[in-house]
Every structure is written in C-alpha cells, then in structure tokens.
Amino acid sequence: MKHLLQPLPSSFIPRPSSLVPRPSPLVLLPFTLLLLANTLFSQEVLQWRGDDRRGVYPDTELLQSWPESGPELIWEFAEAGNGYSSPLITDNRIYVTGEIDTITYLFALDKSGKQIYKVPVGKEWTINYPGSRSTPTLVDDLIYLTTGMGTVACLEAKDGNVRWSLNMMSDLHAPGITFGFAEGLLVDGNTVFCTPGNADTNVVALDRFTGEIQWISKGLGEHTAYCSPLLIRLPERNIMVTFTAHALLGIDTKDGTLLWSHKQDAEGDVHVNTPWFEDGYIYYITGDGNGSVKLKLSDDGTAITEIWRNKACDNTMGGFIKLGNYIYTASYEKRKWYVQDATTGANVDSVKFDKGAIIFADNMLYLYNERGQLGLFKPDGPKMVLVSSFKITRGSKAHYAHPVISDGILYVRHGNSLMAYNVKK
C-alpha cells in the first residue's frame, strides 16, 4: 500500500548550519544540471563494509597465513576515543569517529596514522557501551555520519568543516533508543537517508547538500533497529532495505513508498546486520528475530516471498559473508560459527571460535571475535578451516568494530586504538 507522505511543518524543517543569500534559480540552473550529471555518473561512495556493504574487499596478493604473533603491526593510533565504528579508508586518508568526554569527534589521519584534524560533531551515546557507533560515509568530497545521540551531519572531507547538521531527536521526532543511533548513513544520488524511528518520521530522506527534507516515510511506525541500510538498484526503482524494531522494510528511494515488509516473530529489537542482495534474492540474519532468512524479491521490487528461514542461526551484529552457495556467519547464543547452505538454509558445519565480525578478501575469511582473537580462515565450500590466529592486546573495552582491508593493510579498531597490519604477501 502506498503511503501518503506529508511533510513536517515548515518551522520543523531543519536548515543548514549557515545560511547565505540564494541567487536566482536561472543563475543556478547550469550549475545544477552539471552537479546532477556529476552526481549520477561519477559519484564515488565509500561506506560501511565496502561495496554494497558486504564486507568483501577487492585486495589480492595477501598473506595466506600469518606468523604465530600475527602480521606485522605497522602503526597504532591510540587517541581515537571510545568507539565501535570502523575506519573509512581513501587513497590518501583515513577517517574514523570516536567519543571523548561525551562528544563525537571525526578524526582524519594520513596513511601513516598521523592525525590531520579532529573535529567535534555532536553528543555521543554514553549510557551503555559508551562510544561512537556510526561508520562515516564518504561521497566525493563530503562525509556523512550520525552520532549516538542522533546528530546527523555533513562535513567537508578536506578540513572537517560542517556543511549542515540536524538532530533526529529534536528535529525529526526520534524517540529514545536503548543503545544509541548507529546506522552508517546511506546515500543514493543527491539523497541521504536516516531512520529516526518515530511513527510520523520513521525514515526520512534529506537533500545531501543542504539537509532539507525531501520526503518522509511512516514505514510501520516502529523505532530504529541499528541497521545500516542496503541499497538495491533495479531497472524500475531503487530500494532502501533496512530494519526497524520488528520488521525488515523495503522503501522506494524516490518517494518513500513502503513497498513491502517482513515481520520478525520475536520480541527483540536489535537488528544490526546489513542484508545481502544477490541474483534476485535478499538474505538477512538477525539475533532478535527470524534468524537467518532468504527472500525472493519480485522483478519490479514491489513484493517478497520467503524461501526459507533458520532460527538456529542468530548472528546479532557481526555481519555475514556469502560465497557461492554458502553463507558464513556467527551464532550469538552458542558463540560459534556456522556454514549455511544458501539453497536450503541448513547449517552444514560449525566452528568453535567465539562470535564476532567477519570480512573477506583474496579467498580468505577474517574473523575478529569478541574475545579479541583475529583468525584467518580458508572457506572450503561447506567448511571453514582455521589457518592462523593471534590476539589483539592493544586498545580498550569491547571488541565489536568490524575490520577493514585496503591496499594490503588490515585495519582493526579496538576502542581508543586503531591499528594497521601489513597483510601483503
């Protein structure tokens, strides 16, 4: 059913942090057309878990085993503040968020780990598991992120200057939340999406250059569920796929129409893992709902059909990797790893390595568990074979951040420390 989207009152619409006189629309027209063309055809997006948010990195010629003490530690940046967000890696810079004295800071580092700048963004979550949650999203020369207390900000990557900001609680009616806002913001063209999670402002689309509201979707009226959304591009439409408290939602990015939803049959409301789309099927895994699920998406994107679900596979926030016909993921309750058959949903193997985050590069799986062990595994169809492992001893607090691989460097964030390991052959 198509929802009638009503904009908020004009007094409620957030404005950029600094306003300047606006020239005539006729003067702006050539620039606007050029900007639109550049956005649509040359937009570079760096984001949470890489391309399509899958945790699959394109690096090759990487080590296929490690020394007993682990790969070489090249450098450590030990002043990142409290946080569980992952670093964002560009050709010449690294961006990472961290909380210091209740404030979220965006750090820019050079590729040797030296700080270039450190800028405040907004209030961070400090009630439980204090620290930054949101991994930045970089689109061309602009960075988008949210803080645990709901600030959504657009910053210039070069110097950290704030282009615009708003707060989901004060500006978009967001209700209180148990663990702080955590989504890695999704960008599609000239639009950035956020999920305040209120009945009247469930999902909101903002102009990514000004922060002004483009549309509002009421969704199912549920509060946000810490998910970094997936963007599915189809010939007829683009779809934002994300979780709210008790359902997976498919929302048309053009106007906010709720196309479909998939209800969870559990009372939990923590659904962190970004779904995976491949060959017409959506896969998702959650620890507070249906477990592991495969859905068939209709060709036009307006409907879903459940293919299977596996309640025993209950990864809450470590992500998952699909390779061919097999899915590799962790179990939250049993604190081990499963290999699933993607055709049937059955668990075909299990490995004891404690639960945690998973990424993939150069035919190897990298598992970073909550006990601080980093393991290198060889995926072998229905098997996962441990090749090497070592313990992360630097840093502070919980081991929740997802690792990143770029240009032969493995980046591991543990609380206030960001570490760079050389994993090139």
Image: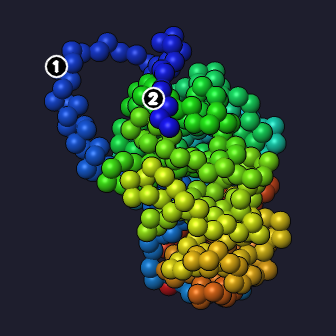
Label 2, on which residue? 215
272 or 283: which is nearer to us? 283
Callout 2: SS:
strand
Q: Is residue 16 left or right of residue 340?
A: left
Q: State the scheme by which the image is colored.
A: rainbow
Q: Position of residue 247 (x, y in %)?
A: 65, 47
Q: Are marks 2 and 1 in contact (CB under 8 Å)?
A: no
Q: Residues within 10 Å of mark 2 (few under 14, many from 20)?
A: many
Distance of label 2 from label 1 (alpha carbons) = 25 Å
Label 1, on which residue? 26
122 w.r.t. 288: above or below: above
Can residue 410 be seen? no
Q: Amino acid at mark 2?
A: Trp
Can residue 166 be seen? yes
Q: Residue at x 83, y 65 (%)?
A: 333
Q: Please tell me the numbered disc located at residue 149.
A: none
Q: Residue at x 57, y 77 (%)?
A: 343
Q: Residue at x 67, y 66 (%)?
A: 309
Q: Residues within 10 Å of mark 1 (few under 14, many from 20)?
A: few
